[in-house]
Amino acid sequence: MTIKRSRGILAIGSALALGIGLVGCGSPGESADGPVTISFWNGFTSSDRPAVEEIVARFNESQDDVTVEMTIQPWDVFYQKLLPAYSAGEGPTIAGFNALQFPGYASKGVLADLTDFYAEWDEAENLSAPAVEATMYDGVNYGVPMSAASTMLYYNKALLEAAGITELPTTLDELAEQAVQLTQYNASNPTESVYGFAIPDHAAVSTWTVLMQANGGGVVSDDGTETLIGSDESISTIEKWADLVRDEHISPVGLGGVEGDTLFSAGKAAYYVNGPWASAGFIDAGVDFGVIPVPEGSVRQTATLDSNNFGINAAATDAERAGAEEFVKFWASVEQQTYWALQTGFAPTRTDVETSALEGNPNSLAFFEAKNSQLAFPGQVNYAQMDNDVLTPTIQRILNGEGTVRDLFTEAAAQIDALL
Amino acid sequence: MTTTSPARTSRGSAIRRRTLLTPYVFLAPALGVLGFFVLWPMVRALFTSFTNSSIIGTSEFTGLANYERLFSDPAFGNALLNTLVYVVATTPVSILLALGLALLLNRRFAGRTFFRAVIFFPFVVSFGIISIAWSFILDPQVGLVIGWLQQLGIPTGNGLRDPAWAMPLVAFVGIWRNLGFYMVLFLAGLQSVPRELYEAAEIDGAGGWCRFRSITLPLISNTTMFVVIIATIFAFQAFDHIYVMTNGGPFFKTETLVMLIYRTGFENFQMGYAAAISWVLVVVVLALSLAQMAFFNRRAVRY
């Protein structure tokens, strides 16, 4: 039996039953001839928010046909509302969100197929190739890059100097040695400890995945079809790093992304992997830091690609769709991308921006030159479950000594297999 | 018996009808809101729980499949156990502390209102925001309280990130938050106890403990019943501070049923299964509340 739902009521009902208020918002489209108003949702609430607002304002001023009405809300609220909103026919014309979440939404048919748009857009070839790759699901293009960033290795210059380290690491093995050397662990009062290499295990761009990928392992293969977490490469990598965390205390156990940032800001972490969005906070905190590419592993040099895409509502009217396409083209223009990079420290989403234009922001330049980054879970419809239900708790169990890496990763591999 | 004229009968029944109707007219706005925003969604959720709904697209009727899945799902077992631990850890402690504080603050002394306000304060502030504050205070690397405790040589493990400490710490914050509310309820109950009973008991030579046992406790039993039921329901609904402080972690050690419902429904988009877990929670809470009412009604005392 197939049940057709009265969707609005269901969305309201479920939300109330769970004690979470949903606020519906959406703007009605106008006739195809007159000016059109399109809605744009994203979760850029932190230091990059003013730059997003500025580009939207510039677009609205640049022409009279399309008005973008933007709603910025925290990411967790954004993801709670997005699917119910699409389901109630109130979804935003444009939604800007993480590439890892894209396959899940694309598979539900709420995002428009942009194959024709790309075919007609002559500037598409100037976009960063890995960022465009991150908009694909099942061979079809469902998005346009909004922001694309590679993670890099941040280092605290003062801590390195105090430890007499003059050569920055070029391999992960060197990073491991230096991390041990830099760590000053105080067992009786961890608030006075200094950590060599802070590695968050939840609510952060996964450093654990990069460590595995650099040594030929990972959670899933690059083409997204195979489980790699149970492989010998993944197991031996995590055995090594988990020992360093547990026995040498190079990082606190159970660190979240926010706490990792706090630790580095407080000058209590020497090395830390994160994306460009963290740099503004570190500058504010007065940390004297530098960034270098994540050192190479036994197989390759890699980093996490953290990409946000614009997705266009599959149910948008022709006029809304045309307006949305205008907006994403405007966003991708050299002028706006240069502004974006200088303001936020993100690399531009296109490759033909002159490096000389980015000299005003050394962080942006460094991130622009980062290469080889890849998605942590490429092409996975069930990405959220793989990360929240399998990878994160498994790493936490290992770090808390709840079993051997081999046993727990073999168990995790079976769970990932079921979600592929 | 006298015969009544037809006219009088119809007039009488019209009045009776009107008097019967009046209370419902007054109740209608409240019942309407309750029905539309509480009962109707609950019925819809029950309906959803028999489907494989995933928020969008069509869904199939799957009968009892979601409920069968509960029995073999380790995540559900874990969340149920965590919820029971949380309920058992927080409910009696908060009620006893609240009663004790109410008895203390029912006496007359300087600064009484100040202390009442201080204890009630956490209930008024946004739970989400004070939870953020607590997670900073309890952070093992940069936390203020953790730093002090460690300087005093009191072990705190890895704070909120320690699988052994996470649950006690969120339970502590849960107790701290609701204590003031229960205390105010008990204060209201204590003030409804007639003063002359205490005077009479004192003349009869009853001591403090005896007066408490034989007068206070029985006469506030209605309040106690209300507080016990509300406290149990609050504990079963624990979500806000856990979501903010641990998000159910480390590795699901603090994942309660409501956290699991949230993760299943709004992160994994398995709305049908999330609705089934919600209904299990409704049934458990309802059964417990009925049992508590039966227990207290048997003990209700009036003088």
Image: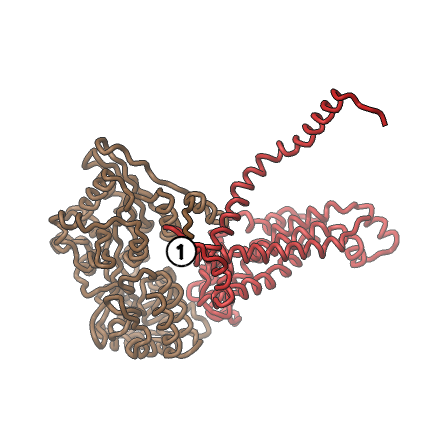
Q: Is residue B258 above or below residue A60?
A: below
Asked where in the image residue A60 lies, by quadrant, the reply is top left
Colour in which the image shows chain B? red
* Left or right for B95, reference A117: right
For the residue pair A54 and B289, the one nearer the viewer reads as: B289
Q: Residue at x 19, y 66 (%)?
A: A372
- Left/right placement of residue A9 relative to residue A267 reads right
Location of residue B245 with respect to A175 vertically, above or below: above
- Residue at the disc numbered 1: B269
Indicate left or right for A292 with B135 as reference.
Answer: left
Can residue B203 be seen from the camera position used here? yes
**Where is the C terminus of chain A found, in terms of image quarters?**
bottom left
Question: Which residue: 43% across, 67% down?
Answer: A191
The picture places residue A252, in percent across and down from the top left corner, at 39, 70
The figure's colour scheme reads by chain
Chain A tint in image: brown
| Badge 1: chain ID | B
Q: At x 52% / y 48%, what residue is drawn?
A: B42
Which residue appears at 52% of the width and 69% of the height? B152
Q: How far across and how far down the image is residue A20, in percent?
A: 46, 49
Pick the residue in front: B277 or A386: B277
Q: Residues within 10 Å of mark 1 (few under 14, many from 20)?
A: many
